[in-house]
Amino acid sequence: MYSFGAEPPSPTQNLSRHLAAVNQIGYQTDWPKRFTAPLSDDGIHFIVCWKDDPAPLFTGVIKDHVGDFSQFQPADTANDYVVVLKGGTLGECVSDPFLIRKELWREQLWPSAIDFMIDCRAVVGTHCSAFGGSPWRDGCFYDFAVPSLIFLYEANPGLIESLPHQMDWEKDKTRVFAPDFPFKSDKILELVKRYYAELEAPMTDAPDVAKLIHWGLGWYLVQFGKNEDKVNAQIVEHFAYLLSAWPRLKLDRWLPASFYDRCREFAQRHWERSGLLAIDPEWNSKKWISLEADNLGQGLVLPYKGHNAPGHSIVPNLLMYELASRTKDPMAAKYQQAAREQAAWIIAHLDLQDPRSTKGMRMSEHRTIPSLVWFLQHHPESAPPDLKAYITAWASIMVKRSANLWDFRRFDLENRWSLPSFNEPGNLAGFPACALAASWVVDDSATVQRLREISVAQFDNLFGRNPKFAASPSYPKNGFPLIERGWPIKYRPNTCAVLELVRGSLSASPGTEMYPFIPDGKFRHCEGWVNFNTAWNVGLAYFAWDAGKQAPTKK
């Protein structure tokens, strides 16, 4: 299932000295800054200092194996910091180096996230393949790719429009139509040729994210454009995000009007027949694998694969309601009623104490709570009356499940820290959207602060604050130059999405087998996935929205 890379798995940690697990990339100045010292007793002092100068810049004390230097808010610099721990019966520890900068994630993570979406395109990306038959290699109906790109654009349009251009429509078109183009699937190649032949091109100077949006939805327009059969609901949903964002982002600067018209016609034609006005039957926990099951066989993967997260259609229905209201479309009332009924169904039937309803949704978890918050913030007059109380209850449960030395939001408080069996970096990447969204409507200030801490902690986990002291990417040189140690095993090359050729790919994270501190515990599957990275896009967007004190799409 996986192979070892050039470097063997990291050796057993030296347990005779203190250890400090930090985010190897670094911390944002105004956000929580915490690390884990799994061997250190309460009261052990730590300092933060320059990597090359031991003079203390900040001093703190370990409590419950956690060091917190959130109050240390230095001016931006390109120099590295380290944490130093010493005292008691253990030897001194110097942590991995890290940066502290006000916009660190915008500088270090956003470009890599977008590079991934460029490189992982099917057929025309960094590998001439289309595993899965979707716009992105190994993508699928629930990859949330296009909406995640729209979220990034909405959350920071200035950055998106300032990034260097990498995509070139004409060059890609020329490659695809070349007689010697090395792609063997006639059906998919014909689809891509039709994309370039039948659709008007984006503007040459359009931001790459706008071109990626065109690529993703254009693929579906060609694939299903003349299909009168039912199209999967979560594919149809993608189009609502584009239609909603079009006027706010002034996308007519970059994309042709004919593209908007085709997207709108597609959404309206397929909406009701795809089931988007109904309750998705797979939201019902009676269809899920039992909580007691550990050995997940093929087919017995609901909900852990992340297929059909409860509430995935709420925001799309609200967006279509807003569009229909502006254009006096009589469908407006149906869209609004569907969103309300779906939210009410979740409140009545989705048991938040059941971890399958939360972390059990894997990388798709961000389709539920943020959707309920969106409803409450954008349309409070029509939201179900118990919606805020439900979100508040979710927040309380998440805070309880995160009370540990890693600030790690656990699957449950019994024996499972992570999902049963599956790898879950996408869950860590997308969870901040859930916690930050909830923090916008929860009243208790302590809960709000804790939601922000655990949001950051899940990102920290991806980049080294975990029992393996390793960052998620197996190929950190591809997009993550500040990482000291990437994931120590690699998925077999030239397989599925061929992500060893892609920048910015998230590969793995520790499973239950390594918690609370078993660094040589069993590895889980170490394959990256576009679905993980699109969840990361969503997490990054929510951090930006939170920093700007603005809800999604609310100007």
Image: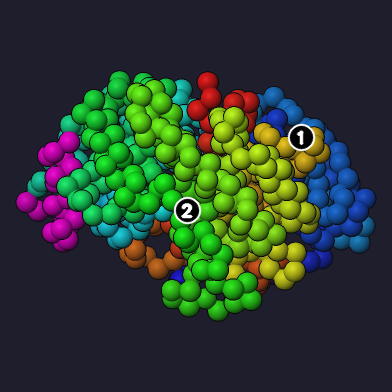
For disc 1, the marked residue is 443
Per the image, the residue denoted by label 2 is 279
The residue under the point 70% across, 63% down is: 412
Which of pointers 2 and 1 indicates the residue nearer the eye? 2
Q: Is 331 left, or right, of 92 in this rendering?
A: left
Question: What amino acid is labelled 1 in the image?
Answer: Asp
417 sits to left or right of 157: right
Residue 330 visible in the snapshot: yes
Residue 196 in the magenta stretch? The answer is yes
- At numbered mark 1, what does the secondary structure look like: helix, strand or loop? loop
Q: Nearer the viewer, residue 100 or 197?
A: 197
Image coordinates for residue 249, horizontal then vertical, percent: 40, 23
Q: Using the image, determine if residue 348 lies above or below residue 553.
A: below
Q: Quadrant of the N terminus?
A: bottom left
Q: Residue furthest left?
A: 179
Q: Which residues are magenta?
A: 179-199
